Image (cartoon, grey):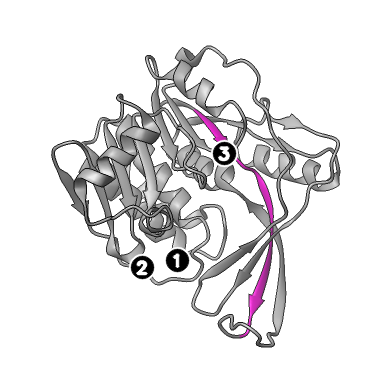
Amino acid sequence: MSNILLLANLNCDRVLQLDRPLATGGRHYYADNGRRLGGGGANTGLGLIYAGHKVALVSQVGNDKTADWLLAEASIQGLDCSLLQRNDLDTPELLLVMTPDGERTIIRPQRPVFTLGAAPDMSQWQALYINSSAVGCERWAQAALESTLVVAQLAKDSRCRPCHVLVSSKSDMNNQGINTNNHHDIWQYGLQIAGDQLRHFIITDGEHGAVAYNQHQAISVAAVAASVIDTTGAGDAFASGLIHGLLANQAIAQAMTTGSEWAAIAVATASSIPGVELQQYLINSY
């Protein structure tokens, strides 16, 4: 299998289960379901580990007991945390406010600035995945393009993300004011973010599936039906399945289908990180 490097967050999720959907000005009762490992680094990385890949995580955590717990939990799960940077701040919990239909609202404080050092030798990794606002991500991506598959999530502020495969959601595209019904506009926007080496710009749309755009065509795949328990980590699971498929030399449509299958399992699991359900699915599939 492959060596994969993730630039992504490692979070301590605190889950608050509401008695009913959120309503502005309303009053809500909640049950505190405790803390759990989360963040794009864990949510994406563990699926890839379950599939047999070696995954190293680059992120930043504090130097307190919560950070110690995070590193211990991530390491037990098989994530290589040797490249994590620690600061002198307390590690805050990220609040996941869950409603009975499985939807979640995320509440978190501003993160401290995380600045990457010089890019390592990227030839030792077969894939680099970027889902981080760290300063220097662009340099690391640029250094990896010639030797390594680079997959990146579109940043909220539309900063440059040199990559071969760019991933976003329809809601984020609408927030950027991009007409998601115009193929030309979508592709030009993708090139603006990712550069001329962009092969595919994938836009996910929840239960409506996903579309991969290139210069000449748009390739659609359907979502996989699921009984939704917890939508946390669905996009991360899609990304991990997509990366796994691409590293297995699947065509883009099949790789997206793999991502959709992993995402469907994720939303049917009451956790942030992929659960035993994905592990069992991968054992039975491979």
Amino acid at dot 2: Ala
Q: Which residue is mark 1?
A: 268
Residue 209 appearing in the image: yes
Q: Secondary structure at mark 3?
A: loop
Q: Residue under circle 2?
A: 226
Secondary structure beneath dot 1 equals: loop
Q: Kindly indicate the quadrant of the structure image that contains residue 71.
A: top right
Q: Quadrant of the N terminus?
A: top left
Q: Residue at x 54, y 48 (%)?
A: 43
Amino acid type for the residue under numbered disc 3: Ser
Query: How far apart are labels 3 and 1 at the CA level?
Result: 26 Å
Give the structural element (helix, strand or loop) at label 2.
loop
164 or 6: nearer the eye?
164
In the figure, is residue 19 to the left or right of 165?
right
Q: Nearer the viewer, residue 49 or 36?
A: 36
The reply to whether the magenta stretch includes residue 18 is yes
Q: Earlier in the sequence, mark 3 or mark 1?
A: 3
The earlier-in-sequence mark between 2 and 3 is 3
139 vs 35: above or below: above
Segment colored magenta = 5-19
Against 148, is 227 above or below?
A: below
Q: Main secondary structure of the magenta part?
A: strand
Q: Residues within 10 Å of mark 3 (few under 14, many from 20)?
A: many
2 and 3 marks in contact (CB < 8 Å): no
Q: Is residue 258 magenta?
A: no
Mark 2 to mark 1 CA distance (whole Å): 6 Å
Q: Residue 33 sits in which quadrant?
A: bottom right
Eye-nearest disc, 3 or 1: 3
Q: Which residue is mark 3?
A: 132
